[in-house]
Amino acid sequence: ILYADSENGWDLVFDDTIQHNGNSVLTEMPFANNQRVVIPSGAVQSFYIYTPSRLRYREEGTEGQEIQSDESLIFNAGRAIAVTKWDVPGSNVVSPRVLSGILTYDAIESANPATPAPTRNPTQPPTTGPTNQPLTPSPTSPPTNAPTNAPTSAPTSAPTNVPTSAPTNAPTNAPTNAPTAQPTLNPTSSPTLGCGNGFCEADESGDTCPEDCLDLILIPSEVGGNGAYGTMFSVTALERDVEITSINFHASQSAGVQVQVYTRRGSFEGFELTEDGWDLIFDSPITTNGRSDPNVLDGFNVVVPSGETQSFFLYIEGESIRVMYEPLANIEQTPFSNGPLRFDQGIGKMSKFIAGDESLLYSGRILHGQITYNVVNIANVPTPSPTNAPTNTPTNAPTNAPTNAPFNAPTNAPTNAPTNAPTNAPTNVPTNAPINVPTNGPTNAPTNVPTNAPTNVPTNAPTNAPTNMPTNAPTLAPMTGPTPSPTSPPTAKPTFGTAVCGNDICEPTEDSISCPGDCTDIKLAASPDGGSGAEGIMFEVNAVRDVIITSLDFHCATGVSSNVDVEVYSKPGSFDGFEGDVTAWQLIHQDTILTNRRNTPTPLNGFDTSIFVRGGTTQSFYLYTPNKIMYLTPSNLASGELAYNDGNVQLFAGVGVTEVKFSSTSSNIVSPRVFRGSISYDAGSCGNGICD
């Protein structure tokens, strides 16, 4: 520790140009000419590995602390030096650091082993002639006080003069028959900073320097002697935003299996036995390669912001193939890091999600495999699902047309569109006050003189846009008497507003026949989010007006596009009490479709049988696929409570169905769950003279 500022006292035992194997495969550095470093029992020996190309290490313990040991050797934590070769002003020293690699050694039983450095006293008489190497296994006596500039023609049988009081810090140079490459006393030029130096620096990312910041690899463990059906682990992004792109693992043997990968924000602790909060990002059949060769799982991109932790759960379906890992006595003392990403902790699992069965968990397990990731700028990474906040700022003024049609429809049927001008305009004031009660019968002619002619135009100009509801409510009671001159009879029932076909709003006076552009293929968008899933979901819709449900878009719980079987059932009224009664349901759609990935909705492209729902009635739907459907687990709703409403159709929270297609067993029903996707429908209108 006290000799890191210069090469004084250090012996060069390896100096060569080699081909390194990257950051995932070990690069061997055998000492030349069988050079060995002998460490006497109880002694401490230091090593310094230097290369302008960077070395891999991890942060652990404190400098000088014991990190790992066996019965013969103890390995202690050290430090790393960047920018300069030695720890001098201007260098960048980081501590503690632990080498990622292997030390190879022999345990020997020698009282006087030969050392590669000069001894204070010669162990053998000097040789009769110069050797080809500057350092001999048994060097001669210490050099004289003033060495000659050139060797004598023949060596003397004994050293000349009196030996120096102490040997020099480094042996003097001696001529060789053919000069060997020697390191300079001063270090070579320091490693260059910038893109292309093999190190993703603080001002670089995958966008600005892909060669340094993309496809980085973190290896939690290079060995794996134990295994289970699954493993959970957490990683933390250290001072940089990272994007996990693939996970490699070793399996216990080669076989065809179904592999699933789940992820969740934060630590997995407290969530080992429940599926709630976990997002399924990979679900695909693979053929494992056995213990020797890793299996690559990719096709997902999980962004971990700087300073945050992300957990993963890798699971193999079945009961024969296992995920391999290495057990450790105390996971908290063994963090692994290669700079931007740190592997925190892990466990083994012998079951998938079984509440209350903690006996199937094994703590202190490190994945045998590797994690591939990119260093990114999170501001430039698109989110996989819509954000909670609006993406656009609100406009300064409201739009001319309402965004949604009014919720409540008028009780009376609407009239035809109004005429361009009113038939008669009201007089300024009535000619005579009305009498309290009507006369026995109308007079033959109106009394008095008729009022003045009506005005040519209405007194008030119309508004720029229609209001959602009529501005004035009808009077509570009719007038107590007729006017002196009765007006013409009304042409039709009063209207509540003027419908405008083509404004993308299916208003109460429109339907799929009169205005197909506004009232056909309407989509009620349900939850855009949802990290949980099951094989099926049951939910109810309520029709505010007559509608025809024509299709669904849903999110499939798979990280890749794949072919899945899909079935849709429907029944009038509520599904409650009919979860296990297949006879109560009608199969309205059955198909094998190619799904999109989980964050892109998959359309069914129309039911085999569309469902008409009368206004004011409820209809239940059941969507099922063996490959699982994503839904939202709400925190503020119960099953049967209103979740979404667009004025024509209301969607209520339902239940998820696991494993068994139709089951009344409570363990197969999870509640509440909200459908994630959209419902397509056409708006009809009973009583419009058309048999829809």
Image (cartoon, grey):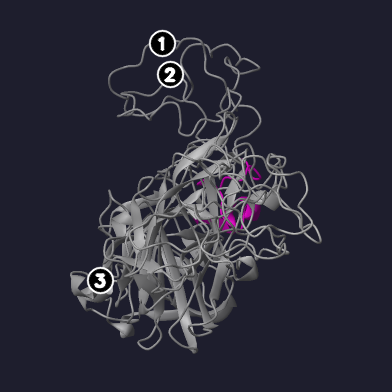
Q: Amino acid at mark 1?
A: Asn
Question: Eyeballing the image, is 105 above or below 183?
Answer: below
Q: Quadrant of the N terminus?
A: top left
Residue ID at (72%, 60%) = 17
| Residue plotted at (66% across, 17% down) | 456
Q: Amino acid at mark 3?
A: Leu
Q: CA distance from mark 3 to mark 2?
A: 92 Å
Mark 1 or mark 3, whichever is nearer to me: 3
User: Which mark is drawn over residue 432?
Assistant: 1
Image vertical order of residue 509 relative to residue 6, above or below: below
Q: Main secondary structure of the magenta part?
A: loop
Disc ID at residue 303: none
Q: Which residue is mark 2?
A: 484
Of the 4 image quadrants, the one containing the C terminus is bottom right
Residue that label 3 marks = 361
Whole-percent x and y of residue 49?
A: 57, 53
- Asked if residue 512 is among those painted magenta in the image, a careful observer would answer yes
Closer to the camera in the image, 169 or 412: 169
Q: Are marks 2 and 1 in contact (CB under 8 Å)?
A: yes
Give the SS element for disc 3.
strand
Q: Position of residue 8 (x, y in %)?
A: 56, 41
Question: Which residues are drawn in magenta?
Answer: 500-524
